Amino acid sequence: MRACSCCYSWLAFIFLFMKTCRVCLAAKPLDAFYQSKSACRICLCAKEKRRRLEKGDEIRAKARARNAANPEANRTRVKAWVAANPERRRRNALAYARRNMDKIKKWTRENPERLREGKRRNQAIRKARQCGNGGNVTRTGWLTVVASSGGKCVYCLADCRITVDHFIPIRHGGQTIKGNLLPSCQRCNSQKGDREPRSWVEAQFGAPALARVLSLLAAA
């Protein structure tokens, strides 16, 4: 019995626009496959998940070593991916939070000060971006700045809970970068506000304090 034209059309469609996965043996559209891969995306993702479960520690150790060997290249690569995939990054963050809710709650209870420090740093970055000043600082970069002052307020030298202070205020074009950030107590940060920073420091704490602050900024 001869095949009708509809059968030939369907076979041509399968040949041109469909592909059979070598793993699950299902015929799927071409967009269900990565380019030049004979297994479909679903099967490859499942294989990768199994590999990460079996060799997770080894994979993470290699990634840490690779990033430590060339941190600047890694930061550039991550920034480029984040800028190109904002929606995917948001979905991944939400999915991770849903999967690890108990773990996140436990970490929050056990690390209140680190959580507050992260919120202060993110708030400083967000304010600068809203004003169009730009800049960014990693947690490691901020902790380096804090350590340079001994964990104290850089102005009054009080040993208390610190905040993130922009030496050149955001309203005057100050960026959220290591060379413009200083650890400050809430009192000094509020009093300084948007005033001209050098005049304020010298008037409040004298010329030696201004020299100390400028040396910390120069060393950042």
Image: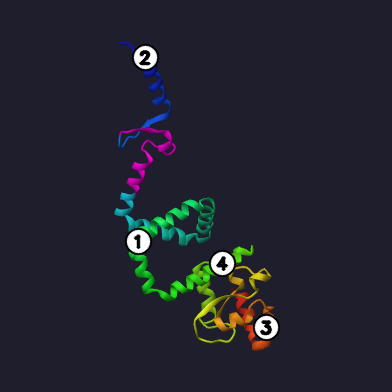
Label 4: state its secondary structure. Answer: helix
The residue at which mark 4 appears reads as 125
The residue wearing badge 2 is 4
Q: Which mark is residue 46?
A: none
Specify start and end residues of the magenta stretch as a single range: 25-48
Crowd class of label 1 (few under 14; some 14 to 19; many from 20; radius 10 Å): few
Of callouts 3 and 2, which one flags the residue occurring earlier in the amino acid sequence? Answer: 2
Q: Is residue 104 left or right of residue 168?
A: left
Image spot of residue 87 (x, y percent): 49, 52
Residue 193: quarter of image: bottom right
Looking at the rendering, in which quadrant would you find the C terminus? bottom right
Q: Nearer the N terminus, badge 1 or badge 3?
A: 1
- Where on the picture, by quarter, is residue 207? bottom right
Closer to the chain start, of discs 4 and 1, is 1
Circle 3 residue: 200
Near-viewer residue (109 or 78):
109
Identify the image quadrant of the N terminus.
top left
Nearest to N terminus: mark 4 or mark 3: 4
75 relative to 147, above or below: above
Q: Which residue is mark 1?
A: 100
